[in-house]
Amino acid sequence: MRTQVAIIGAGPAGLMLGRLLERAGIEAVIIERRSADYVLGRIRAGVLEQSTVELLARAGVDERLKTEGLVHDGIEISFDGDMHRIDFSGLIGRHVTVYGQTEVTRDLMEARTSSGASSIYEAEDVSIHDFDGARPRVRYRKDGVTHEIACDFIAGCDGFHGVTRASVPKKALQLFERVYHFGWLGVLVDKPPVAEELIYAHHERGFALCSMRSPSRSRYYVQVDADEKVAAWSDERFWDELRRRLNPEVAERLETGPSIEKSIAPLRSFVAEPVRFGRLFLAGDAAHIVPPTGAKGLNMAMHDVRLLADALIEHYGDKSDAGIDSYSAKVLARTWKTERFSWWMTSLLHVFPTTGAFGRRIQRAEFDYLKSSRAAATCLAENYTGLPD
Ligand code: FAD
Ligand code: DHB
């Protein structure tokens, strides 16, 4: 088989890239190692930047988003129960939209199915070859048969544990990483959200987040030790712990019920440099990871694939490689700013083994500064709603 662009991974990055290329008349095949149902079953991000919403519109997959997405003009920060609102629209005239990653994925998958574009799910032993030359190839096994795809370019959209970054010679890569000694335990519940906006809470027992998927479905998280097991957390234990970390009036209003999903996500900051190797490009979680505190991972993935799609469109249409040549530098410049913001939000809101009494006073001072300084609040608003290119 031959195609123009082989896309490895059918998460939001791979599906969006496929869609943008398809609309520009560029042929792409998506190769995914899991089943479509498995990909849709992963509960992850919930907050979209304005530029992500604009990209979904450009891709023609924003019908449901327009009616079901919840526009949020601000967030609440709670510090030991003391609440302060960051007013995005008042400060900078911007907002975010709450719409689950599952829904973004479903909309992109449905668009791909109805256009008849080629996707291979449950591909085993995916491997990539000769991306440093003119004729890259992708190999995989399906139903016991080995297949090979010849292509012009390979897009590595296969997440943090994927095969593409792992196939780059070690000496060509520089890796930057910070692993945090805690994770987020998340619960999805069919009960109305406790508040109209998201609440990010710092408490001496650890971080907590009150989020949502719709007016009748909520998503809550609490910080737990990195080695915690989901099985150790009954619903009762989760709700008790969450209530303790919230402002008492908010805790009083919390509507609880049986969890419909419960999982632990580790926290990590990670950047690979560069993100282009000949005819291989990394995008999304394959290239960088942020701790979820700033709600950035999905949005970064969307930013990368917009740049990559535009670079490939320019290559095939205008016969110019300017976009391809600047892809890595552009991605990295924005990535590091977003890494900084996600690290900062994480540092402000979590309890670290090394925080100590001094560290807690510094965290409190940071919160008080956010409350008293328009400049500090504006900085948070600018970063949370999404930095420009
Ligand atoms: P992925 O979604 O990981 O997709 C990669 C795909 O590649 C997967 O389908 C995988 O099966 C496939 N794959 C892997 N290896 C191979 C292989 N060898 N061959 C073929 N296919 C392969 N981000 C936000 O922006 N906002 C949020 O609010 C937010 N909250 C989050 C909350 C949690 C609890 C978590 C865990 C993450 C959150 N994120 C958030 C981050 C966001 O979910 C990720 O950044 C996003 O999924 C990245 O998309 P991706 O397509 O790059 O990677
Ligand atoms: C959600 C996840 C996040 O990481 C975040 O910062 C905000 C919301 C969510 O899953 O709803």
Image (cartoon, rainbow, N blue to C red):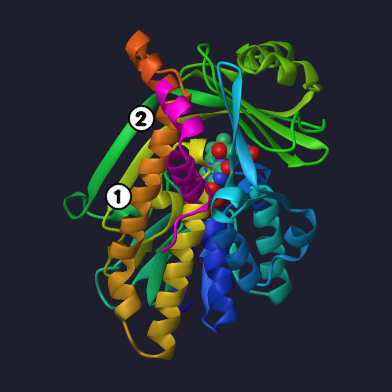
Dot label at residue 170: none
Q: Earlier in the sequence, mark 1 or mark 2?
A: 2
Label 1 and label 2: CA atoms lie apart by 15 Å
Mark 1 = which residue? 272
- Which residues fall within the magenta stretch? 365-389
Amino acid on which disc 2 is placed: Val
Mark 2 = which residue? 179
Query: Is residue 383 depicted above or below 350 in this figure?
Result: below
Q: Is residue 358 visible?
A: yes
Q: Quadrant of the rendered structure where residue 278 is?
A: bottom left
Q: Residue furthest bottom?
A: 318
In the depicted view, which residue is nearer to us: 56 or 129? 56
Q: Is residue 144 visible?
A: no
Marks 1 & 2, CB-CB < 8 Å contact: no
- Judged from the image, the secondary structure of the residue bearing numbered disc 2 is strand
Task: Report the side of 215 relative to 316 (left or right).
Answer: right
Query: Is residue 314 depicted above or below 242 in this figure?
Result: below
Q: Residue furthest left?
A: 171
Task: Measuring from the top left, give residue 239's x and y in whole percent.
Answer: 71, 16
Task: Measuring from the top left, give residue 135's x and y in whole percent.
Answer: 32, 77
- Judged from the image, the secondary structure of the residue bearing numbered disc 1 is strand
Query: Mark 1 near ligand 1 (CB under 8 Å)?
Result: no
In percent of the image, x 33 and y 86: which residue is there? 320
